[in-house]
Image: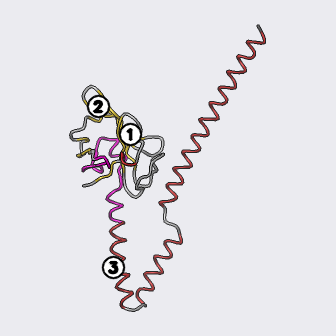
């Protein structure tokens, strides 16, 4: 009997140790993934120096090259303006201001959600808003007698297991995690 009790305690200790190791591994794995996504979006020194070299060479080059460089410059500024207008204000959303999500969001299956500054327009009531562990913004939505979850993925944040356009903000919604890229919502207006 004493040997059996000793083995039980040993098994409990071993299970506890395995749980701690698994949780620690998951934490480091997801934290590393988030850092990788941030590193992908950060401009490198090489990219900055290339940009300044291009601007300098355009003033000394021929007119045709200068014209090409000037045509490229507005698109770069336009991309910067689009990125700034796409910036999601997490703190405002946590405080109930959904202004950075205003508009219609559609997925590849034709499903839509529409937001105004107060939340969802016709798809249920947002009851709980919180920050997810990986930089997402999480909603609990009540729709009639049931409900569903919604996650906002700011540009640059990877959706595990799915291909999606990292240059854009994205939404996922439903009672289960999305299984295909067609289920990811993008802002259309």
> Does dot 2 land on a helix, a strand or a loop?
strand
Residue carrying label 1:
138
Which quadrant of the view contains residue 96? top left
Q: Is the C-beta separation of discs 2 and 1 under 8 Å? A: no
Asked if 152 appears above or below 67 in the picture, the reply is above
Where the C terminus falls, by quadrant?
A: bottom left
Q: Position of residue 180 (x, y in %)?
A: 41, 45
Q: Position of residue 116 (x, y in %)?
A: 23, 46
> Does dot 1 land on a helix, a strand or a loop?
strand
Q: Residue furthest left?
A: 122
Taking the image as shown, residue 44 lies to the left or right of residue 98, namely right
- Find the magenta span and give its range: 80-109
CA separation in Å, label 2 and label 1: 13 Å
Query: Which label sits on residue 175?
Result: none
Front position in the image: 132 or 3: 3
State which tag comes first along the sequence, 3 or 2: 3
Residue carrying label 3:
71
Inspect the magenta stretch and tell me whether residue 185 lies in it: no
Callout 1: few (<14), some (14-19), or many (20+) C-alpha neighbours within 10 Å? many
Residue carrying label 2:
142
Front position in the image: 180 or 32: 180
- The residue shown at (67%, 29%) is 17
Asked if 180 appears above or below 47 in the picture, the reply is above
Inspect the magenta stretch and tell me whether residue 95 lies in it: yes
Asked if 181 appears above or below 9 in the picture, the reply is below
Asked if 161 appears above or below 38 in the picture, the reply is above
Which quadrant of the view contains residue 26? top right
Taking the image as shown, residue 90 lies to the left or right of residue 125, namely right
Taking the image as shown, residue 144 lies to the left or right of residue 84, namely left
Q: Residue furthest top?
A: 1
């Amino acid at each position: 009997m004493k040997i059996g009790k000793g083995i039980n305690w040993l098994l409990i200790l071993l299970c506890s140790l395995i749980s701690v190791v698994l949780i620690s591994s998951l934490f480091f794995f997801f934290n590393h993934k988030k850092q990788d996504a941030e590193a992908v979006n950060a401009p490198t020194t090489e990219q900055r120096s290339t940009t300044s070299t291009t601007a300098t060479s355009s003033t000394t080059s021929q007119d045709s090259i200068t014209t090409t460089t000037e045509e490229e410059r507005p698109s770069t500024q336009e991309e910067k303006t689009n990125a700034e207008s796409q910036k999601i204000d997490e703190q405002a959303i946590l405080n109930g201001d959904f202004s950075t999500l205003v508009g219609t969001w559609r997925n590849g299956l034709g499903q839509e959600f529409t937001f105004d500054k107060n939340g969802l327009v016709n798809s249920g009531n947002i009851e709980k808003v919180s920050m997810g562990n990986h930089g997402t913004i999480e909603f609990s939505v009540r729709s009639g007698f049931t409900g569903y979850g919604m996650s906002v993925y700011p540009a640059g944040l990877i959706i595990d297991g799915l291909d999606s356009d990292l240059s854009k903000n994205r939404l996922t919604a439903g009672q289960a995690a999305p299984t295909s890229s067609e289920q990811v919502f993008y802002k259309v207006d």
